[in-house]
Image: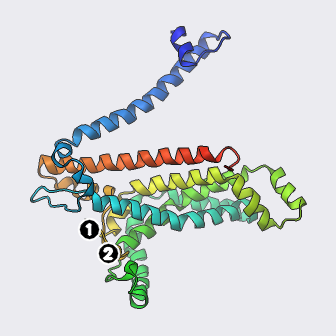
Amino acid sequence: MTGILQTLGLLGTTKKNRGDLIFEVFLLLMALTLVGLVVLLFVELVAGSFPALPTFGWRFFFSSKWDPVREEFGALPAIYGTIVSSLLALAIAGPIGLLSAIFLAEYAPRWLERPLSFLIELLASIPSVVYGLWGLFVLVPLLRPAELFLNRHLGSIPLFACMPWGIGMLAAVAILAIMILPYSTAVARDVIRAVPRAQREAMLALGATRWETIWYVVVPYARSGIIGGLMLALGRALGETMAVTMLIGNRPEISACLFDPAYTLASQIANEFTEATSALYLSALIELGLVLFAITFLMNIFARLLVMSMGPSGRR
């Protein structure tokens, strides 16, 4: 056992007591358990994707047809809806979260910062179905007049050219932006607070204003942590199910207009899983889960590489 641990790099040249050895073995087992769970999840998704995998092949990823009656399935509309809704939500929540984090970490007085931070973090603990209900009864009625205005005055632009229904891609993007806001804000706030005070004082000593110090020193120094928080928020948006299912309209079509109903991978699985009456139909839905797993996995790899490229100080 000692030789194996030395090979894995858990034991150095110095002799360790039995308690340290048992503790390190326990930690190794826990780490391997996590890796094993991910591998088992992937294997189960691949196994459940048969017979859809050999039946449709690569056509499954590039086909827009979803016809359970004829058993013809394509994942492209759901892939499109997942990526577009998540990126648009991140584009909305990212700047708001960063500016909120700067206010909380640099400007807010103590008596105001604590309750605001608590309320922002409380958003992360609200169940998804509650967001969905709030979106249906509060957000959608608020969005409908705005959609009508955009359609009336900017209808020549493809993004606003279709008939506004209230429920559709825009409603899903709005609710996703609200749901991922606490993740980007909380992480950005903590990494901004962790910037050494000497960095601020050096910039102020050179004659910079407070805003210049924050924008040109604090934010670049904390950039890797801020991007990590954004990637965490993006991962949350990619896998969101219930609230999106209630607001996106659930129609397997690709449209450039933000008012049209759409589908995401998670919402399509949740909406149709109980309706799968054939083995091929069920297999196609499980393959959607496999696609979502792959997108999330690739996104995490990209995020890790991006954060590593920034270096510890946030600079390339």
Residue 184 x/y as whole percent: 57, 57
Residue 43, placed above or below residue 309: above
- Residue at the spot 53% in from the left edge and 24% down from the top edge: 27
What's under tag 2, amino acid-wise? Asp
Residue positioned most to the left? 70
Q: Is residue 131 visible?
A: yes
Closest to the observer: 31 or 221?
Answer: 221
- Residue at the spot 33% in from the left edge and 66% down from the top edge: 246
What's under tag 1, amino acid-wise? Glu
Residue 185, placed above or below residue 138: above
Q: Which element carries disc 2, helix, strand or loop?
A: loop
Q: Are marks 2 and 1 in contact (CB under 8 Å)?
A: yes
Circle 2: is it few (<14), some (14-19), or many (20+) Cα within 10 Å? many
Q: Is residue 262 left or right of residue 36?
A: left
Q: Is residue 234 left or right of residue 257?
A: right
Residue 81 x/y as whole percent: 35, 63
Circle 1: is it few (<14), some (14-19), or many (20+) Cα within 10 Å? some
Residue 95, placed above or below residue 280: below
Q: Which residue is mark 1?
A: 253
Residue 223 x/y as whole percent: 65, 54
Q: Is residue 274 left or right of residue 117?
A: left
Q: Which mark is residue 46?
A: none
Q: Which residue is mark 2?
A: 260
